[in-house]
Image (cartoon, grey):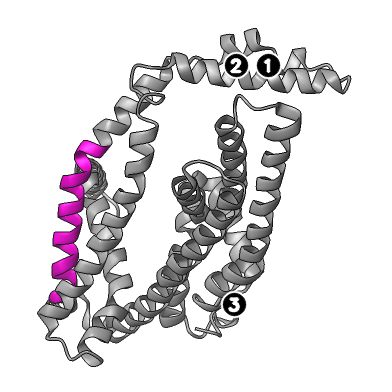
Amino acid sequence: MITSKIIASGILKAVGALLLAALLLYFLYQIQNVLIYLLVSLVLTLIGLPFLDFFKKRLKFKHTMATIAVLFIYLLIILGFIMMFIPLIISQGQNLSLLNTTEIEKNSLELIKQLNAFMELHRIDSEAIFNPENFKSIVSFNIIPNFLNSVVGTISNFGMGLGSVLFITFFFLKDKTIFLNLAKLLIPDNHESKILNSVEKINVLLSRYFIGLLIQLFIVFILYTIVLFIFGIPNTFVIAFLCAVLNIIPYLGPLIASILAAVLTMLSNLGSDFQSEILPTTIYVLIGFWIVQLIDNNLSQPIIFSKSVSSHPLEIFLIILIAGFLFGIMGMIIAVPLYTIIKVICKEFFPENKFIQQITKNI
């Protein structure tokens, strides 16, 4: 028989559980930077494990020295990225000054005027679309200083974040056995083997995925650099790097990269004749980028998204599409790794389910 005392006790327990959950969420929100550091460190650890094994087995390094060697590789890569941006900062320092928005507005309006003149020459009414006065009223260039100031603030915190991430990654690589043993103490005995098998498979699949992704971005970067170098676009390496990084966003990233490359190409040639120089060069660059993306879509991506995580291309496409609709761009970026983790866990805990068997048969 249910009494009022039992009902009251149940309500109190439910309220207490909700309060604890709310406090936990608030606590996680307050330490979100730490969670990001841990997540990035975990990704770097997964990427670094094959290199760690290579240094230990092939080069006969001690475990600590192998860990230091892996971190040294990461530092070299980061240093390379920083050195890559120095020419851009030096050459564009005046035009992209935190307070100098006049030059940016002037160049953009000049480009729109030239585009208007070209369209009018071909009897296309462009005033309603590219009217400079309308453009000035819609686009406020005052947001640029605020944006750049926020970037500067982010960069100022980059040093602390980088140091924290590398410090955590070092101990994840060096003491992975200790962390694994601690995790075993928290795992129920009846699920220990399943969870450990899941962790091992996830480690292998995600290591392959992230290494493959880095190789893909490097290939795209080289091809973008060749295209921009052929047509003499200034700041070739920086533009190619930015466009290559956008490829992290599946399907949508290459489109954004093409638009970015087109805009930067037109602005870099500002002052030349629009019809005979700016427009043809931009079209050639776009064609070059589309050829690169065609190569990437038919060679690099199928290998990474299909073979590295053992999933069908259509399966990956649908997962990315759903994640994009639900969580936006960030959802598209993490869709494949997260889906891989879910598949591995489902295979270990629900091996008799026919649907699970079908989608995990290659794992």
Q: Which of 104 and 339 is in front in this view?
A: 104
Picture quarter with the N terminus: bottom left
Q: In this view, does 89 lie above or below 195?
A: above
- Identify the residue under disc 2: 109
Residue 328 falls within the magenta-colored stretch: no
Q: What's the distance in space between the residues labelled 1 and 2, CA to CA?
A: 6 Å
Residue pointed to by mark 3:
355
Identify whether 10 is placed above or below 200: above
* Residue located farthest toward the right when viewing the structure as drawn: 123
Secondary structure at numbered mark 2: helix
Evaluate whether residue 24 shows in this view: no
What residue is shown with label 1?
113
Marks 1 and 2 in Cβ contact (< 8 Å): yes
Q: Residue at x 27, y 32 (%)?
A: 152
Q: What is the x, y in percent for residue 156? A: 20, 37
Which quadrant of the view contains residue 132?
A: top right
Q: Is mark 1 on a helix, strand or loop?
A: helix
Residue 279 figure quarter: top right
Numbered range of the magenta stretch: 155-176
Of labels 3 and 2, earlier in sequence is 2
Report the Cα–Cα distance between label 3 and label 2: 57 Å
- Residue 329 location in percent, x, y? 50, 46
* Mark 3 and mark 2 residues within 8 Å of each other at the beta carbon: no
x 84%, y 20%: residue = 121
